[in-house]
Image (cartoon, rainbow, N blue to C red):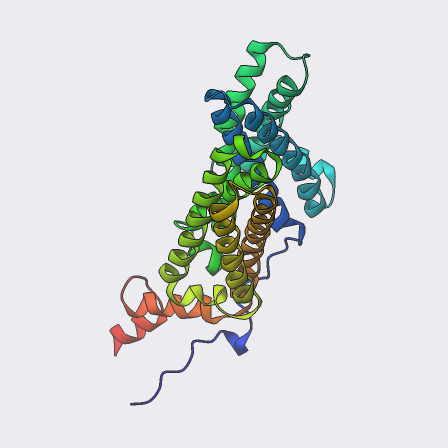
Amino acid sequence: MVPRAEPQSYYGQPVLKQPVWKPEVPFYFFAGGLAGASAGLAFAAGLRGNRELERRAWINSLVALSASPPLLISDLGRPERFLNMLRLFKVTSPMSVGSWILAAFGAATSVAAGAELTDLVPAEAGGTAKAASAALGLPLATYTAGLLANTSVPAWHGARFTLPFVFAGGSAASAGAAATITTPLRHAAPARRLAIGGAALAVGAALTMERALGQLGEPYRKGAAGKLSRLAGALNIAGAGLIAARGGHSRAAAIAGGAVLTAGVITERWAVFRAGFQSAADPRYTVGPQRARVESGEARGAARANGAGS
């Protein structure tokens, strides 16, 4: 039996153009996820009367939020490009939807944090802003996964059903880690639980995503992206494990575990980012699945046409 040749494009050249996003993008993904999930944690803590955790989580959300626009504008190149994205709302565009979510979340969180930290915001307005910020936090934490999946990059588009769970888990883990670092031990139990649960979801979803992608998941296992992915998993497990084992008894362990877990979430964002570049550069991940669909009868193409006419 003659071995089947690897699917190739014209002279082995990439079928897709490389993504044009800059290195600021993975950090934007991280900052947005941290801001969104921290708002949800703050709102939940307020409902339970945990004022210490609520106050610190709102501060964490505001700090992360403050980093998001500069990172996005730096990637876009000019500030007016961000404002131009707010000229219309296009529900079929993740970029348009995400820009509006970020703008609305920014306004609500600024008022919510202002109500928490000062006496300048009326209580009723502050309560409404807190609820709005928490409601917008989840889509802010996960819309970037939809933004990636909406491209034609195989490693991103093929993961459109699982990548949101990876980002949701990482966002929850980062929010829990940040609050674990900044909150006194006796008030930080909900933050520790969020950090541990988020890390478990992020690691489990990443493994599920790689398996579900099949051949398209190779970039998450090989090259620079593969190294980053393995490092992210190790850091997430180590950070969550340290928080679970010692985070409730030792302030130093809580800070160390939170820092390690935060590094793991950032590394995971970078792993996903690099995997997209690797899959776009290799024609196997575009041509191979296309030919497989044609040969199986799922799509029309030259292979089926030639077979039908022979």
Q: How many marks?
A: 0
Which residue of the protein is positioned furthest toward the right in this rendering? Answer: 78
- Compared across the picture, whether 156 is left or right of 106 comes to left
Q: Nearer the viewer, residue 280 or 138?
A: 138
Tell me residue 219's x, y (percent). 49, 66
Tell me residue 133's x, y (percent). 54, 26
- Compared across the picture, whether 194 is left or right of 125 comes to left
Name the residue: 67% across, 50% down: 24
Above or below residue 99? Residue 292 is: below
Above or below residue 112? Residue 121 is: above
- Compared across the picture, whether 52 is left or right of 193 comes to right
Which of the 4 image quarters holds residue 305? bottom left
Name the residue: 32% across, 62% down: 299
Name the residue: 48% across, 35% down: 189
Above or below residue 173? Residue 272 is: below
Q: Nearer the viewer, residue 220 or 58?
A: 58
Quadrant where the N terminus is found in the figure? bottom left
The answer to whether residue 105 shows anywhere in this view is yes
Tell me residue 196's x, y (percent). 46, 45
Above or below residue 141? Residue 280 is: below
Tell me residue 120's x, y (percent). 68, 12
Quadrant where the C terminus is found in the figure? bottom left
Q: Nearer the viewer, residue 260 or 201?
A: 260
Name the residue: 57% across, 25% down: 52
